[in-house]
Image (cartoon, grey):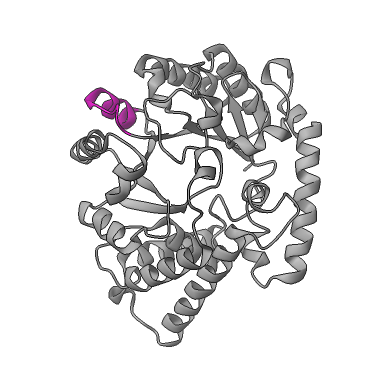
Amino acid sequence: MKRINVIIKVTDGCNLRCKYCYNSESCYTSEILPLERFEKLLTLLSDSFDSIALVWHGGEPMTCGLEYFKKVVEIEDRIYAQTSVPIQNTIQTNGTLIDKKWCAFFKKYRFNVGVSFDGINNDRYRQRSEDTLKAMELMQKEKVPFGCLTVVGDNDYDMFANYRYFAEKGIHVAFTPLFAEGGGVDLEPLSAEVFIKKSNELFDYWLYDKNGVNVRTFSGYISMLLGSHSKLCTNGSCLGKWLGIEANGNLYNCGRDSMKEFCFGNIDAMDDISEAFTSDGFRELLIGSIERRKKCKASCEFFDFCEGGCTDCAILENGIDAISGFSCICFREIFRHIREAVQVLIENKVPLSELNPVINAIAVKCLSEKDDE
Protein backbone atom coordinates (compact mmCIF):
# COMPACT_ATOMS: atom_id res chain seq x y z
CA MET A 1 0.00 0.00 0.00
CA LYS A 2 1.39 3.40 -0.99
CA ARG A 3 0.95 5.70 2.00
CA ILE A 4 1.67 9.41 2.46
CA ASN A 5 2.00 11.24 5.78
CA VAL A 6 1.29 14.98 5.80
CA ILE A 7 2.06 17.49 8.53
CA ILE A 8 -0.50 20.25 8.16
CA LYS A 9 0.76 23.52 9.63
CA VAL A 10 -2.81 24.75 9.62
CA THR A 11 -1.77 28.01 11.33
CA ASP A 12 1.25 29.52 13.06
CA GLY A 13 -1.13 31.24 15.48
CA CYS A 14 -0.90 30.01 19.07
CA ASN A 15 -2.37 30.88 22.48
CA LEU A 16 0.90 30.02 24.26
CA ARG A 17 4.47 31.28 23.99
CA CYS A 18 6.69 28.33 24.91
CA LYS A 19 10.30 29.40 25.50
CA TYR A 20 11.75 26.76 23.18
CA CYS A 21 9.17 27.03 20.39
CA TYR A 22 10.70 26.39 16.97
CA ASN A 23 7.85 28.44 15.44
CA SER A 24 8.81 31.64 17.25
CA GLU A 25 10.55 33.04 14.16
CA SER A 26 7.23 33.00 12.28
CA CYS A 27 5.90 35.57 14.78
CA TYR A 28 2.80 33.41 15.35
CA THR A 29 0.94 34.71 12.29
CA SER A 30 -2.77 33.94 12.45
CA GLU A 31 -3.30 32.94 8.79
CA ILE A 32 -5.33 29.72 8.53
CA LEU A 33 -5.08 27.14 5.74
CA PRO A 34 -8.12 27.82 3.50
CA LEU A 35 -10.45 24.86 3.23
CA GLU A 36 -10.38 25.12 -0.58
CA ARG A 37 -6.61 24.68 -0.48
CA PHE A 38 -6.96 21.72 1.88
CA GLU A 39 -9.48 20.09 -0.44
CA LYS A 40 -7.14 20.48 -3.42
CA LEU A 41 -4.32 18.93 -1.40
CA LEU A 42 -6.45 15.89 -0.51
CA THR A 43 -7.71 15.57 -4.07
CA LEU A 44 -4.19 15.45 -5.50
CA LEU A 45 -2.97 13.09 -2.77
CA SER A 46 -5.87 10.68 -3.29
CA ASP A 47 -4.98 10.47 -6.99
CA SER A 48 -1.50 9.13 -6.17
CA PHE A 49 -1.68 7.34 -2.81
CA ASP A 50 -3.68 4.46 -1.34
CA SER A 51 -3.66 5.81 2.23
CA ILE A 52 -3.34 9.30 3.72
CA ALA A 53 -2.30 10.13 7.29
CA LEU A 54 -2.72 13.76 8.36
CA VAL A 55 -0.99 15.36 11.36
CA TRP A 56 -2.65 18.64 12.32
CA HIS A 57 0.03 20.92 13.71
CA GLY A 58 0.85 24.56 14.23
CA GLY A 59 1.12 26.88 16.10
CA GLU A 60 -1.88 25.60 17.96
CA PRO A 61 -4.25 23.92 15.49
CA MET A 62 -7.26 24.14 17.80
CA THR A 63 -7.23 27.94 17.58
CA CYS A 64 -8.82 27.41 14.14
CA GLY A 65 -11.99 26.41 15.96
CA LEU A 66 -14.25 23.36 16.09
CA GLU A 67 -16.39 24.50 13.14
CA TYR A 68 -13.31 24.60 10.93
CA PHE A 69 -12.48 20.98 11.78
CA LYS A 70 -16.07 19.89 11.24
CA LYS A 71 -15.73 21.22 7.68
CA VAL A 72 -12.41 19.39 7.38
CA VAL A 73 -14.03 16.00 8.06
CA GLU A 74 -16.87 16.84 5.67
CA ILE A 75 -14.27 17.33 2.93
CA GLU A 76 -12.51 14.10 3.94
CA ASP A 77 -15.77 12.14 3.86
CA ARG A 78 -16.57 13.50 0.43
CA ILE A 79 -13.18 12.57 -0.99
CA TYR A 80 -13.31 9.12 0.62
CA ALA A 81 -16.73 8.53 -0.96
CA GLN A 82 -15.25 9.40 -4.37
CA THR A 83 -11.94 7.52 -4.10
CA SER A 84 -12.15 4.94 -1.24
CA VAL A 85 -8.76 6.25 -0.03
CA PRO A 86 -8.76 6.11 3.80
CA ILE A 87 -7.74 9.26 5.67
CA GLN A 88 -6.42 9.15 9.22
CA ASN A 89 -6.21 12.24 11.45
CA THR A 90 -3.83 13.06 14.31
CA ILE A 91 -3.77 16.39 16.11
CA GLN A 92 -0.85 17.73 18.15
CA THR A 93 -2.13 20.28 20.66
CA ASN A 94 -1.20 22.02 23.90
CA GLY A 95 -4.61 20.88 25.15
CA THR A 96 -5.66 24.15 26.74
CA LEU A 97 -8.75 24.51 24.52
CA ILE A 98 -10.11 20.98 24.90
CA ASP A 99 -13.63 20.72 26.31
CA LYS A 100 -16.49 18.22 26.09
CA LYS A 101 -17.41 19.30 22.56
CA TRP A 102 -13.88 18.72 21.34
CA CYS A 103 -13.79 15.35 23.12
CA ALA A 104 -17.00 14.28 21.40
CA PHE A 105 -15.55 15.36 18.06
CA PHE A 106 -12.29 13.45 18.57
CA LYS A 107 -14.21 10.30 19.52
CA LYS A 108 -16.72 10.53 16.70
CA TYR A 109 -14.09 11.02 14.00
CA ARG A 110 -11.39 8.87 15.61
CA PHE A 111 -8.75 11.56 15.86
CA ASN A 112 -5.48 10.49 17.45
CA VAL A 113 -4.57 13.12 20.03
CA GLY A 114 -1.07 14.12 21.08
CA VAL A 115 -0.71 16.62 23.92
CA SER A 116 2.41 18.75 24.24
CA PHE A 117 2.98 18.92 27.99
CA ASP A 118 6.22 18.88 29.97
CA GLY A 119 5.05 17.18 33.14
CA ILE A 120 6.54 18.57 36.35
CA ASN A 121 8.66 20.93 34.21
CA ASN A 122 5.71 22.43 32.34
CA ASP A 123 5.65 25.80 34.09
CA ARG A 124 9.35 26.29 33.43
CA TYR A 125 9.01 26.44 29.65
CA ARG A 126 5.27 26.64 28.96
CA GLN A 127 2.17 28.10 30.63
CA ARG A 128 -1.36 27.23 31.65
CA SER A 129 -0.47 23.86 33.16
CA GLU A 130 -3.77 23.61 35.04
CA ASP A 131 -5.75 24.04 31.81
CA THR A 132 -3.84 21.22 30.14
CA LEU A 133 -4.15 18.97 33.18
CA LYS A 134 -7.92 19.52 33.30
CA ALA A 135 -8.11 18.71 29.58
CA MET A 136 -6.24 15.44 30.04
CA GLU A 137 -8.44 14.47 32.98
CA LEU A 138 -11.49 15.22 30.84
CA MET A 139 -10.19 13.08 27.96
CA GLN A 140 -9.58 10.21 30.34
CA LYS A 141 -13.10 10.60 31.70
CA GLU A 142 -14.58 10.77 28.19
CA LYS A 143 -12.38 7.85 27.06
CA VAL A 144 -10.52 9.80 24.39
CA PRO A 145 -7.16 8.04 23.83
CA PHE A 146 -4.14 10.36 23.92
CA GLY A 147 -0.46 10.50 24.74
CA CYS A 148 1.95 13.22 25.77
CA LEU A 149 5.02 14.62 24.12
CA THR A 150 7.36 16.20 26.65
CA VAL A 151 10.51 18.15 25.87
CA VAL A 152 13.72 17.41 27.76
CA GLY A 153 14.74 21.04 27.87
CA ASP A 154 17.91 21.11 29.96
CA ASN A 155 20.56 19.06 31.73
CA ASP A 156 18.71 19.32 35.06
CA TYR A 157 15.59 17.62 33.67
CA ASP A 158 14.62 14.72 35.94
CA MET A 159 13.48 12.09 33.45
CA PHE A 160 12.71 9.48 36.10
CA ALA A 161 10.54 11.86 38.16
CA ASN A 162 8.68 12.92 35.04
CA TYR A 163 8.14 9.31 34.00
CA ARG A 164 6.66 8.52 37.41
CA TYR A 165 4.46 11.61 37.08
CA PHE A 166 2.98 10.39 33.79
CA ALA A 167 2.85 6.74 34.88
CA GLU A 168 0.83 7.60 37.98
CA LYS A 169 -1.66 9.36 35.73
CA GLY A 170 -1.71 6.45 33.27
CA ILE A 171 -0.49 8.62 30.38
CA HIS A 172 1.76 7.32 27.60
CA VAL A 173 4.69 9.63 26.95
CA ALA A 174 7.47 10.49 24.52
CA PHE A 175 10.60 12.23 25.80
CA THR A 176 11.96 14.51 23.08
CA PRO A 177 15.30 16.31 23.41
CA LEU A 178 15.29 20.07 22.92
CA PHE A 179 15.79 21.21 19.30
CA ALA A 180 18.17 24.14 18.88
CA GLU A 181 15.76 25.96 16.60
CA GLY A 182 13.64 29.08 17.04
CA GLY A 183 13.41 29.94 20.72
CA GLY A 184 15.49 26.87 21.60
CA VAL A 185 18.62 28.52 20.17
CA ASP A 186 18.74 30.93 23.12
CA LEU A 187 18.52 28.22 25.78
CA GLU A 188 21.35 26.28 27.39
CA PRO A 189 22.18 23.35 25.09
CA LEU A 190 21.24 19.87 26.23
CA SER A 191 24.22 17.53 26.59
CA ALA A 192 24.05 14.32 24.56
CA GLU A 193 25.91 12.47 27.32
CA VAL A 194 23.38 13.59 29.93
CA PHE A 195 20.38 12.69 27.75
CA ILE A 196 21.85 9.25 26.98
CA LYS A 197 22.63 8.49 30.62
CA LYS A 198 19.18 9.51 31.85
CA SER A 199 17.43 7.66 29.02
CA ASN A 200 19.33 4.43 29.63
CA GLU A 201 18.74 4.58 33.38
CA LEU A 202 15.04 5.12 32.82
CA PHE A 203 14.88 2.25 30.32
CA ASP A 204 16.36 -0.17 32.86
CA TYR A 205 13.56 0.76 35.27
CA TRP A 206 10.81 0.95 32.64
CA LEU A 207 11.62 -2.51 31.30
CA TYR A 208 10.38 -4.14 34.52
CA ASP A 209 7.75 -1.56 35.50
CA LYS A 210 4.38 -3.34 35.66
CA ASN A 211 2.52 -0.04 35.33
CA GLY A 212 2.30 -0.57 31.59
CA VAL A 213 2.79 3.03 30.48
CA ASN A 214 4.38 3.31 27.06
CA VAL A 215 7.53 5.38 26.45
CA ARG A 216 7.60 5.87 22.70
CA THR A 217 11.38 5.77 22.16
CA PHE A 218 11.79 2.57 24.17
CA SER A 219 8.90 0.73 22.55
CA GLY A 220 9.93 2.01 19.11
CA TYR A 221 13.49 0.75 19.44
CA ILE A 222 12.38 -2.63 20.76
CA SER A 223 9.96 -2.92 17.82
CA MET A 224 12.82 -2.19 15.41
CA LEU A 225 14.96 -4.87 17.08
CA LEU A 226 12.14 -7.40 16.71
CA GLY A 227 11.83 -6.70 13.01
CA SER A 228 8.88 -4.31 12.86
CA HIS A 229 8.52 -2.30 9.67
CA SER A 230 7.46 0.80 11.62
CA LYS A 231 10.09 3.34 12.63
CA LEU A 232 10.13 6.49 14.71
CA CYS A 233 10.03 9.79 12.85
CA THR A 234 13.71 10.45 13.61
CA ASN A 235 14.87 7.01 12.49
CA GLY A 236 14.28 6.18 8.87
CA SER A 237 14.29 7.59 5.38
CA CYS A 238 11.16 9.73 5.09
CA LEU A 239 11.77 11.45 1.74
CA GLY A 240 8.86 10.78 -0.58
CA LYS A 241 6.79 9.40 2.31
CA TRP A 242 6.12 12.69 4.12
CA LEU A 243 5.00 16.17 3.18
CA GLY A 244 4.45 19.34 5.14
CA ILE A 245 2.13 22.13 4.09
CA GLU A 246 1.84 25.66 5.46
CA ALA A 247 -1.26 27.82 5.51
CA ASN A 248 -0.01 29.69 2.42
CA GLY A 249 0.14 26.42 0.44
CA ASN A 250 3.91 25.99 0.36
CA LEU A 251 5.03 22.36 0.53
CA TYR A 252 8.08 21.00 2.34
CA ASN A 253 9.29 17.64 3.57
CA CYS A 254 7.98 18.21 7.11
CA GLY A 255 6.75 20.96 9.38
CA ARG A 256 9.97 22.35 10.88
CA ASP A 257 11.25 25.77 9.92
CA SER A 258 14.68 24.47 8.87
CA MET A 259 12.97 22.87 5.85
CA LYS A 260 12.03 26.24 4.37
CA GLU A 261 15.22 26.37 2.32
CA PHE A 262 13.97 23.26 0.52
CA CYS A 263 10.52 24.30 -0.72
CA PHE A 264 8.78 21.76 -2.96
CA GLY A 265 6.55 24.41 -4.55
CA ASN A 266 3.01 25.61 -3.81
CA ILE A 267 -0.06 23.40 -3.94
CA ASP A 268 -2.05 26.11 -5.73
CA ALA A 269 0.22 25.85 -8.79
CA MET A 270 0.17 22.05 -9.04
CA ASP A 271 -1.93 19.73 -11.15
CA ASP A 272 -0.31 16.56 -9.79
CA ILE A 273 1.32 15.93 -6.40
CA SER A 274 4.27 14.31 -8.22
CA GLU A 275 5.39 17.86 -9.05
CA ALA A 276 6.40 18.27 -5.40
CA PHE A 277 8.67 15.23 -5.64
CA THR A 278 10.35 16.42 -8.84
CA SER A 279 10.94 19.97 -7.58
CA ASP A 280 14.37 21.56 -7.17
CA GLY A 281 13.82 21.67 -3.41
CA PHE A 282 13.11 17.95 -3.17
CA ARG A 283 16.02 17.11 -5.46
CA GLU A 284 18.47 19.18 -3.40
CA LEU A 285 17.20 17.63 -0.17
CA LEU A 286 17.46 14.14 -1.64
CA ILE A 287 21.02 14.59 -2.91
CA GLY A 288 22.23 15.89 0.47
CA SER A 289 20.47 13.06 2.30
CA ILE A 290 21.95 10.42 0.01
CA GLU A 291 25.45 11.76 0.63
CA ARG A 292 24.92 11.57 4.39
CA ARG A 293 23.50 8.08 4.22
CA LYS A 294 26.49 6.86 2.21
CA LYS A 295 28.77 8.03 5.02
CA CYS A 296 26.51 6.47 7.65
CA LYS A 297 26.33 3.12 5.89
CA ALA A 298 30.11 2.96 5.57
CA SER A 299 30.83 3.80 9.19
CA CYS A 300 28.00 2.69 11.49
CA GLU A 301 26.79 -0.73 12.60
CA PHE A 302 23.29 0.63 13.21
CA PHE A 303 22.63 1.96 9.71
CA ASP A 304 20.10 -0.76 8.88
CA PHE A 305 18.01 0.44 11.82
CA CYS A 306 18.21 4.24 11.51
CA GLU A 307 18.94 4.58 7.75
CA GLY A 308 20.92 7.73 8.38
CA GLY A 309 18.40 9.31 10.72
CA CYS A 310 16.34 12.47 10.31
CA THR A 311 17.40 14.92 7.60
CA ASP A 312 15.92 17.82 9.53
CA CYS A 313 17.97 16.93 12.61
CA ALA A 314 21.11 16.74 10.47
CA ILE A 315 20.44 20.18 9.00
CA LEU A 316 20.02 21.69 12.45
CA GLU A 317 23.06 20.01 13.97
CA ASN A 318 25.97 19.79 11.51
CA GLY A 319 24.59 20.19 8.01
CA ILE A 320 22.51 18.07 5.66
CA ASP A 321 25.34 15.75 4.58
CA ALA A 322 27.13 15.57 7.95
CA ILE A 323 27.07 12.64 10.37
CA SER A 324 27.59 12.08 14.10
CA GLY A 325 25.46 14.98 15.30
CA PHE A 326 23.52 15.07 18.58
CA SER A 327 20.63 12.91 17.32
CA CYS A 328 22.98 10.32 15.82
CA ILE A 329 25.03 10.00 19.00
CA CYS A 330 21.92 9.68 21.16
CA PHE A 331 20.29 7.09 18.92
CA ARG A 332 23.43 4.99 18.68
CA GLU A 333 24.09 4.80 22.42
CA ILE A 334 20.48 4.41 23.56
CA PHE A 335 19.75 1.84 20.88
CA ARG A 336 22.94 -0.06 21.76
CA HIS A 337 21.90 -0.14 25.43
CA ILE A 338 18.40 -1.39 24.60
CA ARG A 339 19.74 -4.02 22.17
CA GLU A 340 22.06 -5.41 24.84
CA ALA A 341 19.20 -5.52 27.36
CA VAL A 342 16.92 -7.35 24.90
CA GLN A 343 19.68 -9.86 24.12
CA VAL A 344 20.02 -10.63 27.84
CA LEU A 345 16.26 -11.14 28.11
CA ILE A 346 16.31 -13.58 25.21
CA GLU A 347 19.40 -15.47 26.43
CA ASN A 348 17.96 -15.83 29.94
CA LYS A 349 14.47 -16.63 28.61
CA VAL A 350 12.89 -14.04 30.88
CA PRO A 351 9.08 -14.54 30.85
CA LEU A 352 7.03 -11.69 29.39
CA SER A 353 4.99 -11.76 32.58
CA GLU A 354 7.97 -10.33 34.45
CA LEU A 355 8.29 -7.35 32.11
CA ASN A 356 6.40 -4.15 31.41
CA PRO A 357 3.10 -5.20 29.75
CA VAL A 358 3.95 -2.91 26.84
CA ILE A 359 6.64 -5.44 25.84
CA ASN A 360 4.03 -8.14 25.35
CA ALA A 361 1.97 -5.85 23.12
CA ILE A 362 5.08 -5.09 21.03
CA ALA A 363 5.89 -8.80 20.65
CA VAL A 364 2.33 -9.59 19.53
CA LYS A 365 2.39 -6.74 17.00
CA CYS A 366 5.72 -7.82 15.53
CA LEU A 367 4.60 -11.44 15.23
CA SER A 368 1.42 -10.29 13.51
CA GLU A 369 3.44 -8.30 10.99
CA LYS A 370 5.57 -11.35 10.18
CA ASP A 371 2.46 -13.50 9.74
CA ASP A 372 1.13 -10.97 7.21
CA GLU A 373 4.30 -11.14 5.10
Magenta-colored stretch includes residue 316: no
Left or right: 344 as drawn, with respect to 316: left
Magenta-colored stretch includes residue 106: yes
Residue 264 seen anywhere in this rendered image of the structure: yes
Left or right: 128 as drawn, with respect to 68: left
The quarter of the displayed image where residue 45 is located: top right
348 relative to 46, above or below: below
Looking at the picture, how far across and down is residue 320, in whole percent?
Answer: 73, 49
- Depth check: give the residue in front, 269 or 109: 269
Residue drawn at (38%, 24%) of the image: 62
- Depth check: give the residue in front, 21 or 340: 21
The quarter of the displayed image where residue 235 is located: bottom right
Looking at the picture, how far across and down is residue 362, in whole percent?
Answer: 42, 62
Quadrant containing the N terminus in the rendered view: top right
Residue drawn at (37%, 25%) of the image: 15
Quadrant containing the C terminus in the rendered view: bottom right
Residue drawn at (29%, 30%) of the image: 96
70 relative to 181, above or below: above
201 relative to 290, above or below: below
In the orientation shown, which residue stands out farthest toward the left? 141
Q: How many marks?
A: 0
Residue drawn at (75%, 30%) of the image: 274
Bounds of the magenta segment: 95-108
36 relative to 190, above or below: above
Q: What type of secondary structure mainly makes up the magenta span? A: helix
Residue 278 seen anywhere in this rendered image of the structure: no
Looking at the picture, how far across and down is residue 46, in whole percent?
Answer: 62, 27
